[in-house]
């Protein structure tokens, strides 16, 4: 009986851990494939899947023959290396006794390859893709046909700096304003307190699409379109309800007697706020900071509308969309570019996951 | 609370006396306002390189606002105590309230108003343009010069003739039906599995990781997975490689308009499931950990099996969390834009309200129709808004 229960436990443990492993693989493989691909050689990535970097069996060229020296006529039935067939059959590859003979290329310039099934990898890795997408300089490469080509780099390095320039102020400014407001709502009495806070709660879930057209009109009138100021203020505005709400929840839960004893000692609201509340609220400030950081960094819509086409101010997400548009099939560049946009938020996220989760649990959901 | 009461003591310098403080705070306030206005112009001009702009922006934004609060507070505290107590709260909440009204509250009304006008009309002119060109402060408050059409924009959106809109609404329904529900169910499943596994934290971190990835980045990741090569060529996209491995024909997935009922949308929806399941999982995981272990033990002693425990105990106990997560995920999927925009540009019958809104408002110049769509999005979240407000009014603090 006891033994039976134990083996049943083992079966369920295998089932649980097994299905979890499968789910985790499903979740990590997309990112892993991208990471691997971003380091692969441009020719390899265009002709084989990223998983071929792992050992696998495939036809490997053991000899290459020039059809001209063989003296065969591609327009009739040929016999090469013991295989007989038409040009079309050779193009597909003729297999005999574990050897495949394949015509690679066109009739006039092509070569004949003798191939054998072997264990192999296609693990030619390079950092060239990153060098090419990061700078805005022109670089040259040799394409599949042996021609030298010159291409403009994608200048993601510049866009990376732009994104930092947008994200830091757009994270810090709303926190400061929201912290003051949270304290005011939590610890001060004034006419309008309830009305303002109700407005704030109602605005929590308002989709930001509602603001885009009117704010764009204001910005046009104020001459703010296409400036960083426009986007900092926009993110401040859109982030404020959540920031204030989160910080209010935290600040209003702080023990009342700490504040009261400070007031009895003659401290003013301002002193209590700066000396006591701000340091005590660090966890809440941190969780909102991560939230807003990720939100602004990953944002595309707000940047698209308020920065628009100004090439000097493009952010990473916008640049990446441009790269998708202009180099839709150059996967060596696209994968590297995508990874450049992801590296900072992933680092921040993984190193500060604790605060992020805390923020989520406190109701960090943005409209 | 009044810091000025002891300033009659001897031995204090001028700046520590009441008039001194008043002077300092006034000077500081003026300096702050000059700095903020000047910085605004400097940043708007954007004539210096970004590595100068960014630190300056932080200094301007954070420093300027901190100065405003500090000197403003100093000034208020020099006033008679009655006035201080009256005015100080507005110093604390004022800036936030102003910004909220400018960026969210008024725009809601303005968008509603714009949605009642026909579409024609160019962008407004800058304030300093001549009034004849539509500039000047007199024109500032005008939203447009178009014709009032009442509810026509809405009627046009919902009329059967507008096939684009009909498909967009159908797709949004798919997004909510398949996307939101799958995220919630997967999140719950993974939370339960992880709770009993030995590598809980690693598993949760992996599923959670896509939350840090932008929609645009995720679009590239999945475009690569869905990459199509004609039959016979070696497939470099994982999805088609798997398909061809089982002898099926390669397909273009999200761009495949040949699928019945617009099922190509599913391949876009998968991306968002991948992105937001982590959110659901984290919330469920913490809710599951909050279930009292005695409750589970008692059920086990009574002979309940794990499936029964899951449906009869866990689900009812965490029901509140399930509702919260579902609402959030539904709101999120309702507004989906970036993924569709990057993957298909809203073509191949994959348009949603979010992409139609963008197209109408910002590329076709139909701000009337665009605003009507924004209002429709808003109406969809009104029940949540009402719930939040009712929940709030139950609290004793207000």
Image: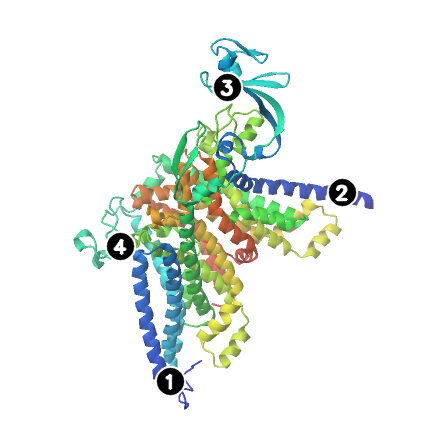
Name the residue that disc number 2 marks. Answer: A8
A149 displayed left or right of B188: left
Mark 4 or 1: in front is 1
Identify the residue shown where x is 55% and y is 30%. Answer: B241
> Which colour style is shown?
rainbow
The reply to whether dot 1 and dot 2 touch (C-beta < 8 Å) is no
Q: Which mark is residue A352?
A: none
Q: CA distance from mark 4 to mark 1?
A: 45 Å
Mark 4 or 3: in front is 3
The answer, for residue B327, to whether it is visible in the render is: no
Name the residue that disc number 3 marks. Answer: A111
Q: Quadrant of the N terminus of chain B?
A: bottom left
Name the residue that disc number 4 marks. Answer: A221
**Do the residues indicated by labels 1 and 3 lie within the same chain of the protein?**
no
User: Under tag 4, what secondary structure?
Assistant: helix
The reply to whether dot 1 and dot 3 touch (C-beta < 8 Å) is no
Considering only vertical position in the picture, is A189 above or below B363?
Answer: below
Q: CA distance from mark 4 to mark 3?
A: 66 Å
Corner quadrant of residue B165 = top left
User: Under tag 2, what secondary structure?
Assistant: helix
B60 displayed left or right of A254: left
Mark 1 or 3: in front is 3
Where does residue A212 sit, x and y in percent of width and height?
35, 51
**Do the residues indicated by labels 2 and 3 lie within the same chain of the protein?**
yes
Identify the residue shown where x is 23% and y is 47%. Answer: B146
Mark 4 or 2: in front is 4
Of callouts 4 and 3, the N-terminal one: 3
Where does residue A84 sit, x and y in percent of width and height?
56, 11
């Amino acid at each position: 009986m006891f033994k039976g229960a134990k083996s049943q436990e083992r079966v369920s443990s295998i089932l649980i851990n097994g299905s979890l492993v499968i789910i985790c693989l499903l979740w990590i493989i997309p990112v892993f494939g991208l990471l691997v691909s971003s380091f692969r050689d441009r020719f390899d990535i265009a002709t084989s899947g990223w998983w071929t970097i792992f050992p696998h069996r495939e036809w490997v060229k053991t000899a290459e023959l020039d059809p001209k020296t063989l003296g065969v006529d591609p327009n009739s039935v040929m016999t090469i290396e013991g295989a007989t067939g038409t040009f079309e059959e050779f193009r597909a590859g003729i297999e005999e006794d574990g050897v495949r003979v394949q015509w690679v290329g066109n009739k006039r310039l092509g070569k004949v390859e003798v191939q054998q099934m072997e264990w192999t990898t296609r693990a030619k890795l390079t950092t060239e893709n990153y060098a090419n997408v990061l700078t805005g300089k022109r670089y040259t490469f040799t394409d599949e046909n042996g021609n030298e080509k010159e291409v403009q780099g994608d200048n993601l390095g510049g866009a990376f700096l732009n994104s930092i320039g947008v994200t830091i102020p757009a994270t810090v400014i709303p926190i400061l304003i929201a912290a003051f407001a949270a304290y005011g709502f939590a610890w001060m009495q004034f006419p309008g307190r309830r009305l303002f806070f109700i407005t704030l709660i109602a605005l929590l879930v308002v989709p930001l699409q509602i603001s885009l057209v009117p704010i764009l009109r204001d910005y046009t009138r104020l001459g703010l379109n296409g400036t960083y100021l426009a986007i900092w203020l926009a993110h401040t505005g859109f982030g404020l309800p959540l920031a204030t709400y989160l910080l209010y929840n935290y600040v209003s839960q702080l023990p009342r007697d700490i504040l009261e004893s400070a007031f009895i000692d003659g401290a003013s609201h301002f002193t209590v706020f700066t000396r006591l509340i701000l340091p005590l609220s660090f966890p809440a400030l941190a969780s909102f900071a991560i939230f807003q950081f990720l939100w602004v960094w990953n944002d595309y819509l707000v940047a698209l509308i308020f920065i628009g086409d100004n090439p000097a101010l493009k952010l990473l997400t916008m640049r990446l969309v441009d790269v998708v548009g202009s180099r839709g099939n150059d996967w060596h560049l696209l994968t590297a570019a995508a990874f450049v946009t992801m590296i900072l938020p992933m680092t921040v996220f993984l190193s500060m996951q604790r605060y992020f989760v805390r923020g989520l649990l406190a109701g960090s959901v943005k409209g | 609370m009044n810091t000025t009461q002891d300033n009659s003591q001897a031995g204090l310098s001028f700046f520590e006396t009441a008039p001194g403080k008043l002077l300092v705070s006034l000077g500081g306030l003026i300096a702050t306002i000059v700095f903020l206005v000047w910085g605004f112009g400097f940043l708007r001009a954007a004539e210096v390189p970004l590595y100068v702009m960014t630190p300056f922006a932080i200094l301007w934004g954070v420093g300027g606002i901190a100065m405003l609060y500090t000197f403003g507070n100093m000034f208020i505290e020099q006033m008679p105590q009655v006035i201080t107590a009256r005015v100080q709260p507005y110093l604390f909440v004022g800036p936030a309230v102003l910004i909220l009204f400018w960026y969210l509250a008024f725009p809601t009304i303005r968008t509603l108003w714009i949605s009642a006008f026909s579409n024609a009309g160019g962008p407004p002119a800058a304030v300093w343009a001549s009034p004849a060109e539509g500039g000047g402060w007199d024109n500032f408050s005008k939203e447009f010069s178009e014709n009032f059409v009442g509810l026509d924009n809405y009627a046009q959106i919902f009329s059967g003739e507008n096939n684009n809109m009909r498909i967009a609404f159908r797709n949004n329904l798919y997004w909510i039906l398949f996307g939101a529900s799958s995220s919630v169910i997967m999140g719950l499943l993974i939370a339960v599995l992880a709770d009993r596994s030995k590598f809980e934290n690693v598993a949760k971190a992996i599923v959670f990781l896509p939350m840090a990835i932008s929609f645009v980045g995720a679009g590239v990741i999945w475009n690569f997975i869905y990459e199509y090569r004609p039959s016979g060529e070696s497939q470099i996209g994982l999805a088609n490689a798997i398909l061809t491995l089982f002898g099926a024909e390669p397909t273009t997935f999200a761009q495949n308009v040949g699928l019945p009922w617009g099922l190509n949308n599913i391949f876009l929806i998968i991306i968002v499931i991948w992105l937001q399941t982590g959110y659901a999982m984290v919330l469920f995981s913490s809710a599951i950990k909050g279930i009292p272990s005695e409750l589970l033990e008692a059920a086990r002693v009574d002979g309940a099996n794990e499936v029964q425990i899951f449906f009869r105990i866990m689900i009812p106990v965490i029901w509140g969390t399930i509702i919260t997560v579902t609402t959030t995920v539904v709101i999120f999927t309702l507004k989906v834009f970036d993924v569709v925009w990057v993957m298909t540009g809203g073509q191949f019958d994959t348009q949603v309200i979010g992409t139609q809104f963008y197209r109408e408002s910002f590329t076709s110049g139909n701000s009337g129709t665009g605003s009507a769509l924004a209002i429709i999005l808003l109406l969809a979240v009104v029940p949540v808004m009402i719930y939040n407000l009712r929940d709030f009014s139950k609290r004793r603090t207000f």
